[in-house]
Image (cartoon, grey):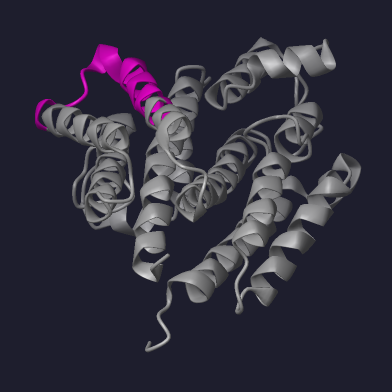
């Protein structure tokens, strides 16, 4: 497969997954902001949302007040923000258009239809009573696109690069979503209790489609430690860090290549650490510190994927 084709497929999948996960992060922050106990807390939540996403500087350049409406507009529909949902769906569509001969017609039609819809929404804006409905629409379009890919695409390297992009992006974003909650609301694992805290953790679990899974696994009250264990170490939880790194590790081994030694080593090491890790060790290190380190390692693996598969020999 040509490196340019693999590059387009990889980023097509990453962009679609990024749109979905940005919607998930915004959704959990929005829901938490409705449960706050003081007028200062929403400001802190939206500010932390921008910082964790690495977008604080870009937002400050807009010279607008920091509130729910402005952050939602910036991260959902701002065409000048390359990480917004709008830009991510546009990038997914453009990358698919570049490889029309590789993706199936059904895949192209799904992505193109999604793009046409988000373009219309961008012109109208998100109604105040339709914020959650908009996030659900983004998630549904991502599920739809992924389902069509599974149902129509040959299981060759094109499929593997799509999956690689999906799970690398998902690992990154699950870590960020989990960090949003801890970074904003719970600096210490011991500082927990009350009905408000229960609803906050419930919102977090629902944002990653893990509420029912939590109930099946633990059958008890929701606690921060168990939420962290589910979303980090449980390989049978589809959006957990362990599940994502399992797939990344498997895919880089299947794709392989003459220059993939360091990539295989790094992905295998991260996979092993999550497979044999313990939540007590993570808590002792500090969850925020652990997630920050994980994000740095995922970024390194992404850079190695770029160097290994996408850089041409002439570069």
Q: Looking at this rendering, what residue extends furthest in the bottom direction?
A: 314
* Overall secondary structure of the magenta section: helix
Decide if residue 44 is in sight here: yes
Q: Quadrant of residue 241?
A: top right
Q: Is residue 133 left or right of residue 308?
A: left
User: What is the quadrant of residue 146 in the picture?
Assistant: top left
Q: Between residues 80 and 271, which one lies in front from this camera angle?
A: 271
Classify 276 as above or below 225. below
Q: Residue 55, can we see it? A: no
The answer to whether 180 appears left or right of 284 in the picture is left
Q: Image quarter for residue 88?
A: top left
Viewed as shown, does residue 29 lie left or right of 135? right
Q: Is residue 84 above or below residue 294?
A: above
Q: Which residues are magenta?
A: 123-143
Is 259 in front, or is 53? Answer: 259
Residue at left offset 66%, top offset 19%? 197
- Foreground pick, 59 / 300: 300
Please state the horizontal and vertical placement of residue 117, each as a whole percent of the image: 18, 27
Number of residue marks: 0
Image position of 46 (left or right of 182)? left
Instruction: Identify the residue shown where x is 54% and y is 63%.
Output: 302
Quarter of the image where the N terminus is located: bottom left
Which quadrant: the C terminus? bottom left
The answer to whether residue 153 is magenta is no
Residue 24 is situated, as x and y percent measured from the top left of the image, at 46, 30
Instruction: Name the residue located 53 percent from the left edge and 24 percent from the top edge.
Output: 207
Residue 289 locus on image (x, y percent) = 71, 55
Please check the rendered image and state whether residue 141 is part of the magenta-colored stretch, yes or no: yes
- Percent x, y of residue 157: 50, 55
Which residue lies at the image location 20% right of the left edge and 36% below the top edge? 112
């Amino acid at each position: 497969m040509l490196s340019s084709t693999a590059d387009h497929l990889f980023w097509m999948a990453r962009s679609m997954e990024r749109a979905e996960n940005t919607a998930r992060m915004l959704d959990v922050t929005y829901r938490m902001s409705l449960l706050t106990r003081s007028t200062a807390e929403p400001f802190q939540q939206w500010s932390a949302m921008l910082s964790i996403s690495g977008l604080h500087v870009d937002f400050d350049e807009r010279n607008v007040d920091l509130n729910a409406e402005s952050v939602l507009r910036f991260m959902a529909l701002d065409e000048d923000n390359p990480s917004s949902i709008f830009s991510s769906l546009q990038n997914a569509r453009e990358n698919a258009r570049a490889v029309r001969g590789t993706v199936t017609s059904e895949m192209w039609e799904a992505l193109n239809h999604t793009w046409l819809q988000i373009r219309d929404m961008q012109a109208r804006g998100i109604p105040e009573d339709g914020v959650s409905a908009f996030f659900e629409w983004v998630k549904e379009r991502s599920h739809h696109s992924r389902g069509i890919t599974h149902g129509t695409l040959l299981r060759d390297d094109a499929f593997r690069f799509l999956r690689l992009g999906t799970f690398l992006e998902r690992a990154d974003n699950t870590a960020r979503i989990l960090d949003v909650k801890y970074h904003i609301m719970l600096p210490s694992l011991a500082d927990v209790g009350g009905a408000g805290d229960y609803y906050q953790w419930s919102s977090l679990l629902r944002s990653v489609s893990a509420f029912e899974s939590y109930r099946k696994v633990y059958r008890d009250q929701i606690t921060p430690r168990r939420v962290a264990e589910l979303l980090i170490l449980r390989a049978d939880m589809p959006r957990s860090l362990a599940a994502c790194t399992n797939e990344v590790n498997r895919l880089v081994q299947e794709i392989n290549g003459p220059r993939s030694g360091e990539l295989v080593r790094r992905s295998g090491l991260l996979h092993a650490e999550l497979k044999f890790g313990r939540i007590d060790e993570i808590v002792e290190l500090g969850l925020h510190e652990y997630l920050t380190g994980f994000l740095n390692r995922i970024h390194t693996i992404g850079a190695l994927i770029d160097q290994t598969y996408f850089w041409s020999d002439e570069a």
